[in-house]
Image (cartoon, helix red, strand yellow):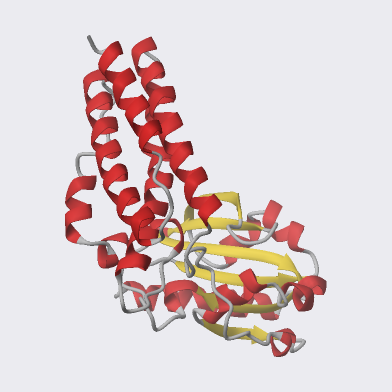
Amino acid sequence: MKMTNKYEEIIQKFIWFSNACPEMRAAAIIGSRARTNQPADELSDLDIVVFSTDPEKYLNDTQWLDEIGNYAITFLERLPVGNGKERRVMFQDALDVDFAILPANQATEMFKSSEVQAVFKKGMKVIFDKDGLFSNLVINPSSSVSETTSLPSKNVVQNTLQDFWYHCIWSMKKILRGEYWTAKMCVDQHMKNLTLKLIEWHYLVNQNESIEIWHNGRFFERWVDQDIQDEMKDCFAHYDQDDLVLALKNNMRLFSRLSKSITKILTIPYPEESERFVWDWFAQVEK
């Protein structure tokens, strides 16, 4: 049986269960299994937003999951949008389902949030609605989850560049001290997040076609230029001093190239002295 059909079984069991539970008031599928742009494939998970009069009951208790299917793993996680929580579940056959369970009496107010609207705008399928809650969802056409749909201000660009070059020295000190874990978290996490910003901005200033840039690097391989993807292969480090230094330097070169291109197009002064200071310091400590 295909994964899509197996997920459909879970959906039907969840509807059957919810029909008998007065606390469950409405639910809708969101994410890849509800959208037409970048739709689901066989590896996609299932995201269900649930509105309940007692969300804590279903977030903190797991017995109800037995009514939906056999599962091997489940835990709670904060939602990427808003202040709510979701129960993430790995059912049999590696069917991963995320139940975002929210207060029903807050639905109307939540629907006014541009972030929440943007999530539903990408695609939604109402699977039950006992009180007509989703009739209060009026999506603003301009709502978007992307933080990079417009070019950044001069101050944002300059601060991002300074942040990156500062952490080049900061992470190198950790490497030299032998704090490889801390250094790797900086090189391969914080500095990669800054690099991702640059890649997004670089795309925006160099492309004539508008494209939605998904949050947190989603679908990176589908819209980022191949030459940048090729360079990124050498920008991630092993848990090793020499490789950390090599990856850091490769990231610095890529970041420098992208940021100089962006600042030139946006007519923003590039911090040449800051970059030179970093490279000079590297040369001294590596003697």
Which quarter of the picture shows residue 44? bottom left
* Position of residue 94 in the picture relative to residue 11 (left or right): left
Which quarter of the picture shows residue 38? bottom left
Q: Is residue 134 above or below residue 278?
A: below
Q: Tell me the quadrant of the picture where the C terminus can be found.
A: top left
Q: Percent from the top left, x then y, of residue 110?
A: 73, 72
Can residue 190 be seen here? The reply is no
Q: Nearer the viewer, residue 272 or 186?
A: 272
Q: Percent from the top left, x then y, of residue 81?
A: 61, 61
**Residue occupying the point 35% across, 18% down:** 175
* Position of residue 51 in the picture relative to residue 197 (left or right): right
* Position of residue 255 in the picture relative to residue 266 (left or right): left
* Position of residue 39 in the picture relative to residue 79 (left or right): left
Q: Percent from the top left, x then y, of residue 45?
A: 42, 66
Q: Tell me the quadrant of the picture where the N terminus can be found.
A: bottom left
> How many dots with numbers?
0
Can residue 6 be seen here? The reply is yes
Q: Percent from the top left, x then y, of residue 236?
A: 27, 37
Q: Nearer the viewer, residue 199 or 219?
A: 199
Q: Nearer the viewer, residue 187 or 88?
A: 187
**Residue occupying the point 67% across, 61% down:** 82
